[in-house]
Image (cartoon, rainbow, N blue to C red):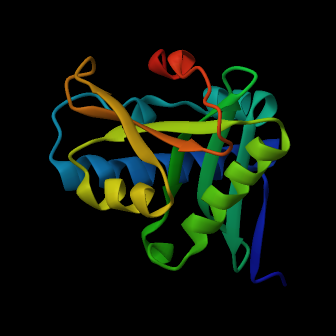
Amino acid sequence: MMYLALRRAVDDDASEVLRITKQSFSLYQDELHVNYEVKALKETIESTLKDIRENAVFVVERFGKLCGAIRIKKLSDGLWYIYRFGVTPEITNTGLGSALLDAAITYAKENGAKAVALHTNAKYYRLARYYYGKQFYVHSTTFDRGYVRALFVLELFEGGVDLSPAFLM
């Protein structure tokens, strides 16, 4: 029996990826006491399957059970975007989430990324500190979704990249 595996998701993982997404984003919503719609909680099995088939979805498995997932997609020649990153409570602070993040960044870099971007609530201090610790910086903020939404960017190479596609996410 494999005790730990980090791999690309396949179609058969869709229901578990959806479960992890809903569980982790429900905790996010509860911790922040938010009253706006958290889009990840509206996700369906169809949208999860679409991401697995069209983008890159990585999962971490422990003792045969999926316990974390991250999605990343190409927005332009040099820019990739991370979304729906979540882990189950039992693996929080174990390093497995960081392994998922590293896998997504490595994948993007191997596929031509010059930068990786993501959005998160700027008031979610614990998560903001986590991304700062991973060398992301806040590029900008917006209030277009009813909360202070920060665009975090990780530059992989000097020279810059057009971040405008991330503004549409």
From the viewer's side, name the closer residue of 52 and 165.
165
The answer to which quarter of the image holds residue 99 is bottom right
Can you see residue 9?
A: no
Q: Position of residue 118 (x, y in %)?
A: 49, 38
Residue, x 43% and y 29% (percent of image)?
A: 42
The answer to which quarter of the image holds residue 95 is bottom right
Can you see residue 35?
A: yes
Q: Position of residue 19 (x, y in %)?
A: 53, 50
The residue positioned farthest toward the front in the image shown: 159
Q: Position of residue 142 (x, y in %)?
A: 27, 23
Residue, x 40% and y 29% (percent of image)?
A: 39
Q: In this rendering, is residue 4 above or below 110?
A: below
Q: In this rendering, is residue 113 above or below 96?
A: above
Residue, x 27% and y 21% (percent of image)?
A: 145
Q: Quadrant of the N terminus?
A: bottom right
From the viewer's side, name the closer residue of 106 and 99.
106
Residue, x 22% and y 32% (percent of image)?
A: 148
Q: Position of residue 34 (x, y in %)?
A: 17, 40
Side of 29 where 47 appears, left or right:
right
Side of 4 where 66 appears, left or right:
left
